[in-house]
Amino acid sequence: MLASSRRLPCRTTAQCLARRSLSTTVASRAEARQRDGGSQGRNADTPVGRNSAEMLDIFLSNTGASFRDPIKPNNWLGGDRPFPLNTSFKPPIPVSDALRTQIYQQFMSDPEKHSVRALAAAHGLSLKRVDAILRLKGLEEHFKQLIVIMARSFPKENKPLQTGFLAGMEWCLGVKQHVEQVKFQQQSETEQYDVREADALMEAEGNDPARLRYRKMFWEPVADGKDPVVPLLLEKARTDGISHARQEEQSKNHPRFLTPHADTSKLKVKMVAPPGRPMMKFSDVGGKFINKDESLKRIKKIEHRGALRSRRRDHLLGEQQRLIQEAKESKKAEKEQARLAARAASAAFKAAQSAQAREQSNSARDLILS
């Protein structure tokens, strides 16, 4: 409105942004005036405009016709890749809502039996993905309960949970709808390798939000001609963490954590599958799935209980020895008392005999004298 009232030429948004992006020097203002003047004289009848319109019509009639009314999922410009210029990026197919609900129900029914690792192995998913599914499903159930509570408290504000876009988005992304089909379908070696690598990376680095935060964003003042220090330190810390995690994995194979077994000769065997039956193969994984911290705690508790039992045993042995010693001493004292009593009795008997002998001698003397 201001441009028309002042009889000034109206500029496009791109031209205004280009003008604002320049500085306010004399040369920049001159360049802007030349650019504005050249753009005012150009219209749709120029060769550039005609070529652009023709190219757009050709694209809409040939390649773009399949994108006007898509009839298949994952209708991407790059075929099976969403970005034509990045052919190495192929995102995995999302997990269907039915399968996520089944995973959540299995976990809630028996968390010990259907643990995160068991569910990940059963459905061919990574541990982080199963953990994210359980957390999001738990949040969804919390929202459903909250909606029920809000509907009872505020009937006029009853707003159902919006799930209308779920089926359409799953169709557009090519999500498998059958739970059993998804569960028992064969995964490619690349997908299985990605799952194993994701689990190994999670177990190596751990779920440390602080490390992820500092790896994603940091600020460091660097002088001209100098190299930053923080990225090298972060990379070194990451490398040290991975090497430490590998050492921890190797330390799990210590005989202290593994069940002792007799040494057997290692021979090369040939696996043969019976007709109509699957082949069974046993692999020694060592202490890969052993929780070292829990094992150390259990070993410390066992050692502590053993020390308590040994101390209690020593105390009982000491009490028994003390009682035996007291019994021996009491028996010895009784023998000494019996010996003293016998000696006293013998002395009394001798005194009585001597007294009787004196009486007899006295009486005999009296008789003689009389």
Image (tube, rainbow, N blue to C red):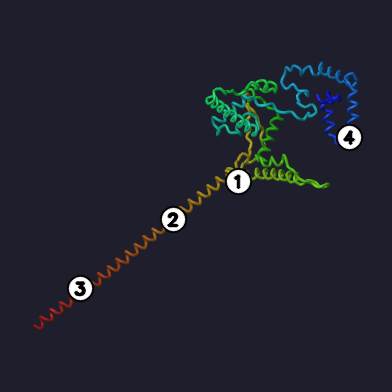
Work out which quarter of the rendered image holds the C terminus and state it: bottom left
Amino acid bearing label 2:
Leu
Q: Is residue 171 among the parts visible in the rendering?
A: yes
Marks 3/1: CA–CA distance: 85 Å
Residue at x 78% of width, y 23% of height = 77
Please rate how many residues cluster around mark 2, counting C-alpha atoms within 10 Å: few if below 14, some from 14 to 19, many from 20. few
Q: Earlier in the sequence, mark 3 or mark 1?
A: 1
The residue singled out by tag 2 in the image is: 317
Marks 1/4: CA–CA distance: 77 Å
Marks 1/2: CA–CA distance: 34 Å
Amino acid bearing label 4:
Ser
On the image, which quarter does residue 100 sit in?
A: top right
337 sits to left or right of 277: left
Residue at x 48% of width, y 52% of height = 310
The residue singled out by tag 1 in the image is: 255
Mark 4 element type: helix
